[in-house]
Amino acid sequence: FPVTIHAQLSSVMYEPCLALMLALQADSIPPAVMNTLAVGYKARDPEHPVAWVGANHTKTNANSLLPAFTIHVAPSVSQQQWDTPLETLLPLLLPALPKPLRSIITPETIESAQLHRWRYALLSQSLEVTPALRLTGLPTCILAGDAFGDYAKLETSYLSGLAASKQLLQLHIVTGK
């Protein structure tokens, strides 16, 4: 890579996220309560151990799925607890759940739990200069993704992919290859 491109790409930074997937016992949440649970919760305090909670069973017909939740641990806590086993991490996080969920998600109601270590989860420093980056001096190679925009969202990835496809089509039209 040319030095400038290498410097640009080296400036991209991601933060880790521990993600816990919890399935609860079928009868652990009364149906009336189950249907009132919000789809997701996002912590207002970036230092809070629990950054986000998703109610997986609200994504489709709640009657057909077990109550299930995904918990994303805040980046700083994820970094600190990266090698912590699930059995140790779970008791640390349950008290940090949002108040309405603390009485629902307990060691007694958890049917199964999985932990996923997502090392490059949250973009903290992006390349704001271009939505896609064509590498020169190589066969046709265009880099795209959430790192190529001013914020990390699905929309950023989409727009970056769109910009990359336009570059590729323009290159094809100009070169005929």
Image (tube, rainbow, N blue to C red):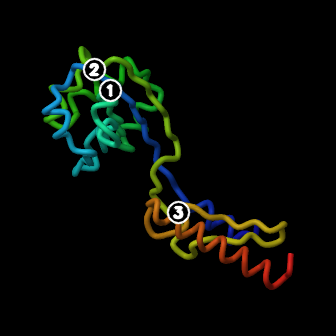
Q: How many marks?
A: 3
**Circle 3 residue:** 157
**Circle 2 residue:** 26
Q: Is residue 121 left or right of residue 130?
A: left
**Circle 1 residue:** 66
Mark 2 or mark 1: which comes first in sequence? 2
Q: Residue at x 57, y 72 (%)?
A: 131
Residue type, numbered disc 3: Ser
Q: Residues within 10 Å of mark 1 (few under 14, many from 20)?
A: some
Q: Nearer the viewer, mark 1 or mark 3?
A: 1
The quarter of the displayed image where residue 79 is located: top left
Residue 104 numbered mark, or none? none
> From what the image shows, is residue 156 above or below residue 56?
below
Where is residue 109 shown, x and y percent of the image?
A: 25, 18
Q: Nearer the viewer, mark 2 or mark 3?
A: 2
Where is residue 168 shown, x and y percent of the image?
A: 72, 74
Residue type, numbered disc 2: Ala
Q: CA distance from mark 2 to mark 1?
A: 5 Å
Mark 1 or mark 3: which comes first in sequence? 1
The C terminus, quarter of image: bottom right
Where is residue 136 shown, x and y percent of the image?
A: 78, 72
**Helix, strand or loop under label 1:** loop
Residue extending farthest to the top is 108
**Helix, strand or loop under label 3:** helix
Where is residue 22 shown, x and y percent of the image?
A: 35, 27
